[in-house]
Image (spheres, helix red, strand yellow):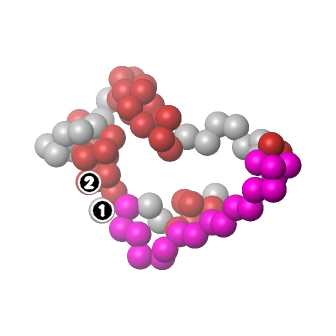
Amino acid sequence: MRVSFWQVWGFDDPQWSWWDLDLSMDIQRLDDCIADTVNAMNADLSRFKAAGGKMLHYHGLSDPVVLALDSIT
């Protein structure tokens, strides 16, 4: 369930509820916490390709937190 993702990983608070979400503060808080791990801000893979890099992308269809469509869009 997606709410557990935000409780455990995003806010590190198992009691967190989406009812408590305060966009004016929480979006920045989330970005500070997980941006380095989840954000792909630079899509330039030219150095990777020039070095002979090959990329494989796989996303299981049974992931209960991140939908497969989220992974490719």
* Quarter of image, res 29: top left
Residue 4 can be seen, yes or no: yes
Element marked by disc 1: loop
Instruction: Look at the numbered discs 2 and 1 and tell me whether their residues touch, using CB distance below 8 Å.
Output: yes
Q: Where is residue 40 in the image (x, y as percent from the top left)?
A: 61, 42
Tell me the distance, in whole angstroms, between the alpha carbons under discs 2 and 1.
6 Å
Relative to 49, 13 lies left or right: left
Q: Which residue is drawn at 50% across and 35% down?
A: 36
Residue 58, quarter of picture: bottom right
Callout 1 amino acid: Met
Vertical side of 53 occupied by 40: above or below: above
Of residue 24 and residue 55, the one placed in the foreground of this image is 55
Residue at 41% from the left image edge and 69% from the top image edge:
63
**Residue 14 vertical position relative to residue 63 in the rendered view, above or below:** above
Q: Quadrant of the N terminus?
A: bottom left
Q: Mark 1 points at which residue?
A: 1
Left or right of 36, for residue 14: left
Percent across and percent down for residue 22 are 32, 29
Considering only vertical position in the picture, is 52 above or below 22?
below
Expressed as whole percent of the image width and height from the top left, the position of residue 56 reads: 66, 66
10 Å crowding of disc 2: few (<14), some (14-19), many (20+): some
Give the extent of the magenta segment: 48-65
Local secondary structure at mark 2: helix
- The residue wearing badge 2 is 4
Quarter in which the C terminus is drawn: bottom right
Label 2 is placed on what type of residue?
Ser
Q: Please indicate, yes or no, whether residue 27 appears anywhere in the rendered image.
A: no
